[in-house]
Amino acid sequence: MSHTLLELMDQATGELGLAQPSAVIGSSVSQTVQFLALIQRLGKDLVREYEWRRLVTEYTFPTVASTADYALPSDFDRMVSDTHWDRTNFWPNMGPKTSQEWQEIQAGLVNFGRSRWRLYQNVVRITPTPSSVMTMAYEYVSNLWVIATGGTAPTKALFTVDSDTSIFPDDLMLSGLKLYFRKEKRLDFQYELAEFQEILATRKAQDQPVSSQNVAITQTEVVNPSVPEGSWSL
């Protein structure tokens, strides 16, 4: 079970030789207020750092005839690349399109075939504008990394009570918190930085399983097909 916010604070301050707080949320002690601000920033930074499996979420939505724009999920942080699919027609949607590509498409005489999409302001914009109901799907990285007391899934983007936990491993949160504190105090932080980077690299590598890899040098046979001249059929 992950450490609560208060347990993380007590462990970090204890390792740094500082006074351990009896409470975090609502505290007026300047040191505790600073530690809370740092751990909130640490969580947000870790969300941006990697596509953690507990943050990756599938989202499906139906299109509406004559409607091109579709709202993003409320906890949307960023799209996972190459996951935008038309489930109705069983093919991937083409995108994301850049502003330049989008304007080229809009200026074309004909716009048909597979859907193209882009992130425009705070919506997914689709072209050609759907004329019927289709089921679209994509995966995105959520910005919710805090698990409410007694919960099992992240539902918050910030710690709000002392008994909240996070999706991130305790050793990563502790090393990051100590690093951030020493940096803010303008103290030497080279050891803490090295420790944090090592733990971060390890946790990222362990977050998603990978298939076994063959590192041996192999010779790939190249087959050049020979096609007879003239008319032929199968």
Image: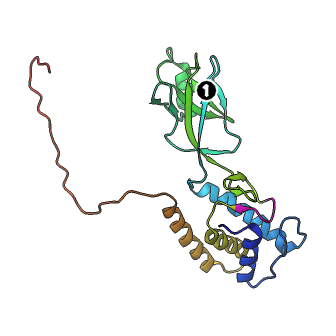
Residue 184 seen: no
At 75% from the left and 62% from the top, the residue drawn is: 164
Q: Is 100 placed left or right of 168 in the picture?
A: left
Decide if residue 158 is on the left or right side of residue 76: right
Query: Which image quadrant: the C terminus?
Result: top left
Is residue 54 at all visible to an observer of this figure? yes
Mark 1: few/some/many CA within 10 Å (<14, 14-19, 20+): some
Q: Which residue is mark 1?
A: 62
Closer to the camera, 210 or 185? 210
The amino acid marked with disc number 1 is Pro
- Is residue 115 placed above or below 5 in the rendered structure? above
- Residue at x 49% of width, y 40% of height: 82
Residues in magenta?
160-165
Query: Residue at (21%, 58%) from the top-left corner?
Result: 218
* Percent x, y of residue 78: 61, 45
In reply to whether residue 163 is colored magenta, the answer given is: yes
Q: Which residue is found at the position 56% from the left and 71% from the top?
A: 199
Please check the rendered image and state whether residue 48 is part of the magenta-colored stretch, yes or no: no
In depth, the one of 85 and 33 nearer the eye is 85
Image quarter (top left, top right, bottom left or bottom right) of the N terminus: bottom right
Could you tell me residue 101's position as x and y percent?
52, 30
Q: Position of residue 68 (x, y in %)?
A: 63, 23
Q: Determine the secondary structure under disc 1.
A: strand
Q: How is the image coloured?
A: rainbow
Dominant SS type (magenta):
loop
Q: Quadrant of residue 106?
A: top right
Is 168 on the left-hand or right-hand side of 11? left
Residue extending furthest toward the bottom: 17
Q: Is residue 28 above or below residue 82?
A: below
Task: Classify 77 as above or below 211.
Answer: above
